[in-house]
């Protein structure tokens, strides 16, 4: 398949603590720079992948499954 149709899956780079404390706030960071996407949880990099070079735009989404979540101080920062 072409690069445009290939699924780009993140590669885990660290084990997540199980379970996260549901009463504590967690800090999530998604970093995108030079085609590389990294996911950080509480200051520790937990996943990374490369962006499909055929994609020219897109969205950032926040997803949670099978649980109730709350967000505070959501920021998009360009550096």
Image (cartoon, grey):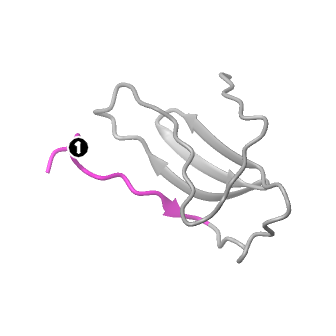
Please check the rendered image and state whether residue 2 is part of the magenta-colored stretch, yes or no: yes
Depth order, front residue of 24/41:
24
Q: Residue at x 23, y 43 (%)?
A: 3
- Main secondary structure of the magenta stretch: loop
Q: Residue at x 33, y 35 (%)?
A: 53
* Residue with the most extreme right position: 24
**Residue 66 at what x, y percent from top left?**
56, 66
**Residue 61 at what x, y percent from top left?**
52, 41
Q: Residue at x 72, y 49 (%)?
A: 70
Depth order, front residue of 27/73:
73
Q: Is residue 29 above or below residue 45?
A: above
**Residue 48 at what x, y percent from top left?**
53, 53
Q: Is residue 37 above or below residue 69?
A: above
Q: Quadrant of residue 75?
A: top right
The residue beneath circle 1 is 3
Q: Which residues are magenta?
A: 1-13
Numbered marks: total: 1
Q: Residue at x 57, y 56 (%)?
A: 64
Other-residue count near label 1 (Cα within 10 Å), few / some / many at <14 / 14–19 / ≥20: few
Q: Is residue 39 left or right of residue 75?
A: left
At mark 1, the secondary structure is loop
Please check the rendered image and state whether residue 39 is part of the magenta-colored stretch, yes or no: no
Task: Identify the image quadrant of the C terminus.
Answer: top right
């Amino acid at each position: 398949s072409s690069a445009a149709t290939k699924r780009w899956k993140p590669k885990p780079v660290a084990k997540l603590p199980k379970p996260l404390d549901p009463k504590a706030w967690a800090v999530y960071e998604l970093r995108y720079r030079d085609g590389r996407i990294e996911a950080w949880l509480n200051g520790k990099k937990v996943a990374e992948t490369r962006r499909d070079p055929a994609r020219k735009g897109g969205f950032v989404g926040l997803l949670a499954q099978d649980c109730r979540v709350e967000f505070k101080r959501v920021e998009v920062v360009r550096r």
